[in-house]
Image: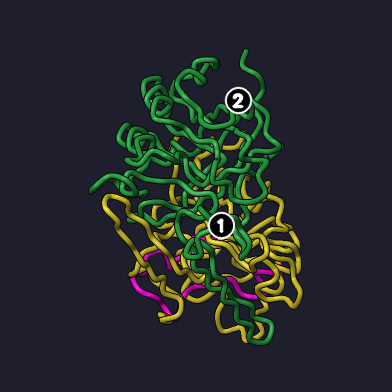
Chain colours: A yellow, B green
Amino acid sequence: MKIYDISMNINPNIVVYKNKEDKKPQFATTKQGYVYETNLTLNLHTGTHIDAPLHMIENGNPIGDYDLNRFITKAQVLDFSHLKQNISANDLKQKQITPNTFVILKTKNSYDKDFNFEFVYLDKTGAEYLSHIPVIGVGIDALGIERNQPKHDTHKTLLSNNIAILEGLYLKDIKEGNYMLLALPLKINEAEAAPTRAVLIKLPKAE
Amino acid sequence: MKIYDISMNINPNIVVYKNKEDKKPQFATTKQGYVYETNLTLNLHTGTHIDAPLHMIENGNPIGDYDLNRFITKAQVLDFSHLKQNISANDLKQKQITPNTFVILKTKNSYDKDFNFEFVYLDKTGAEYLSHIPVIGVGIDALGIERNQPKHDTHKTLLSNNIAILEGLYLKDIKEGNYMLLALPLKINEAEAAPTRAVLIKLPKAE
């Protein structure tokens, strides 16, 4: 079985949102004889993670309220690596999106080595379009699914329409097409987000 | 698809090994307007997690060296909830264990509400027996796979035989039988362990 790992590696040098110090993970390691142990301090939005409504909506649901079926599911990778700024409804209309799948947006972000303040994002019109199809989740190869939208319209549109957001993917080696997605969030039920190990498994072409 | 969640919930009251303060997770939450964000400090051996050889073997391999196929795999749940102290080779011989599966040991630990200093564990003879079958991993419903073995013989036997250890499972609702296990470790490639969201999916009975 060919497994494509689309997760970021959590280490002291991981790229973090806007290069902010407080988003960098901290490792504290002890070694007693041969017993090696680590304490990790991690912002729940560093690396590959899933956002729940609580992150951006007052009294929204926490991560534990998602049904896990949503994270063991068919996924559709859409290649938008030709876009420079954002993904809009008009861009999404060029693709045939299957309802009730988890959509994964591949952009040129996957080729960035450092944090890119001009990362490609899903704009409000794109979020509204996906909410109408509807899809069950949206993944993207950026640490945020949006920027330059002061009221966080993309987050709010998706989260209020019960669409999960999977951020911090790494999709350089992934081609457009259909996959099985496994992206179970760490069980931190009361939190607004959870770090996630996300992988894709290639499915045969639809008949 | 019926998904059995066998993970512990990470929260401030989670049961930790020997009730040690330094194993308790710490949550720091900020709220700016409607934006809610958490920093989590977590010992990598708190809650459901996978151990790699580096945890107990000098210069052993870290968690990132495991092939992910090992964590998307057939698993066999063995019910040992009648045992009071430990699981030995003699106990394991009562079961028909399929080679190259991930074995999951259900014990009376799953019924404990607090940390039980006398938790049921896999002893050295059991670890050696499983290494000879061989299995690809061993899971248990305890925060340690062993106790009372000063040289950590169970860890060392399993890890030096390339058998992954999955600790901190919660198996109260799980019956003996065959399942699919999904237990991808968080991607912290250089670490000695990683927190894991582990689930079982019921498979039809073997023909």
Which residue does the image show at 67% across and 64% down from the upper left? A190
- Asked if the stretch drawn in magenta spans residue A115, the answer is yes
Which residue does the image show at 33% across and 37% down from the upper left? B156
The secondary element bearing badge 2 is classed as strand
Report which quarter residue A194 is drawn in. Answer: bottom right
Residue range corresponding to the magenta coloring: A103-128
Q: Which labelled disc corresponds to residue B178? A: 2
Q: Position of residue A132 (x, y in %)?
A: 76, 62
Q: Position of residue A71 (x, y in %)?
A: 62, 50
Q: Is residue B173 visible?
A: yes
Report which quarter residue B89 is drawn in. Answer: top left
Label 2 marks which chain's residue?
B
> Quadrant of the image for the C terminus of chain A?
top right
- Asked if the stretch drawn in magenta spans residue B4, the answer is no
> Quadrant of the image for the N terminus of chain A?
top left
Q: Which residue is mark 1?
A: A104
Q: In this rendered view, identify the residue nearer to me: B192 or B4.
A: B192
Q: As shown in the figure, which amino acid type bears the numbered disc 2?
A: Asn
Cα separation, mark 2 vs mark 1, equals 32 Å
Q: Is residue B1 visible?
A: no
Pointer 1: residues within 10 angstroms few (<14), some, or many (20+)? many
Q: Is residue A100 left or right of residue A121?
A: right
